[in-house]
Image (tube, rainbow, N blue to C red):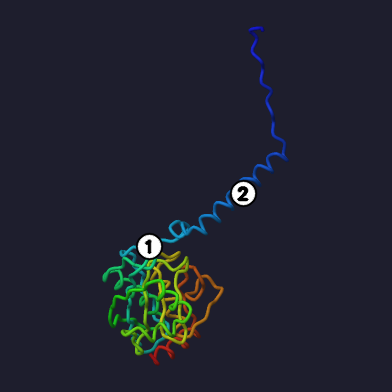
Amino acid sequence: MTGDKEELEYYEPTLKDKIFRIIKALVALAVLMGFLYISGIYQYLLLHKTSSDMEQKKLADLSDAETIIVPLSIFVVSGENPWTTQREKKDIENLVQNASNIWAQANVKFEIKKITGIELNNEKQEIFFNDPGLFIKNVEEYDLDSINVFLTKLLGGLNGIAFLGTKSLIVAEYTSSYDFRVLAHEIGHILGLGHTQNKTRLMSQGSTGNKLTAEEILTAREKAKEI
């Protein structure tokens, strides 16, 4: 045995080795993201609650017509998680006001007709999604003369859903865009508007657009008059 120190040979990774390591890292990341999605943790990473201090600037009227007031019946959902929303009266009023500020471009204004608490257990949740028409028939406070808005905490990763033909919609508290933009968007469906690919428009999916075209304004106003 000698006292000499053994020299370590330095290994320089080849291009092939580097590419292989990158692929392994990407696969690991994909697996991790898949786990987060399946577990539902992604909802807390990608979705956020709109601050009650957030204010939407009132958009300029493009309709040059009289104001149409559309009443909203608000249902604040409680029950089994993840449905129970923490929205208070002030939050709801800001939500509706900001949505109205977006729809000011069509000179359509939303007013809260009433705010009602409603409890949903798992059985009622299943009916709500599988047959919303049947569910609504069993909601005593459901109002045929207004748009019925159900407010929940989470919605399976979705921002909102409009149940066409029932004048009802649902908006989550934790969304990927401002909740008032989601409300304005879903009301657009109730007022006869479909989706568009233009990201600057209100009826684009999952974006922050808020513009309405002249054609959309005419269609929505005619539908709003019926309500």
> Where does residue 70 sit, x and y in percent of width and height?
35, 85
Out of 101 and 38, give the one closest to the viewer.
Answer: 38
Residue 12 in view, yes or no: yes
Instruction: Measuring from the top left, give residue 99's x and y in whole percent.
Output: 37, 75
Nearer to me, 21 or 57: 21
Please tell me which residue lies in front, 163 or 100: 163
Disc 1 marks which amino acid?
Lys
Amino acid at circle 2 = Leu
Residue found 43% across the figure and 72% down from its top: 182
| Location of the N terminus (image quadrant) | top right
- Residue 23, placed above or below residue 141: above
Residue 186 falls in which quadrant of the image?
A: bottom left
Mark with earlier residue (2, 1): 2
Which sits in the foreground, 46 or 209? Answer: 46
Residue 63 lies, with reference to residue 90, above or below; the image says below
Percent across and percent down for residue 143 are: 34, 87
- Per the image, the residue denoted by label 1 is 49
Image mark for residue 133:
none
Q: Quadrant of the C terminus?
A: bottom left
Query: Circle 2 is placed at which residue position?
Result: 26
The residue depicted at 56 percent of the width and 73 percent of the height is 197
Tell which residue pokes out farthest to the top in this image: 2
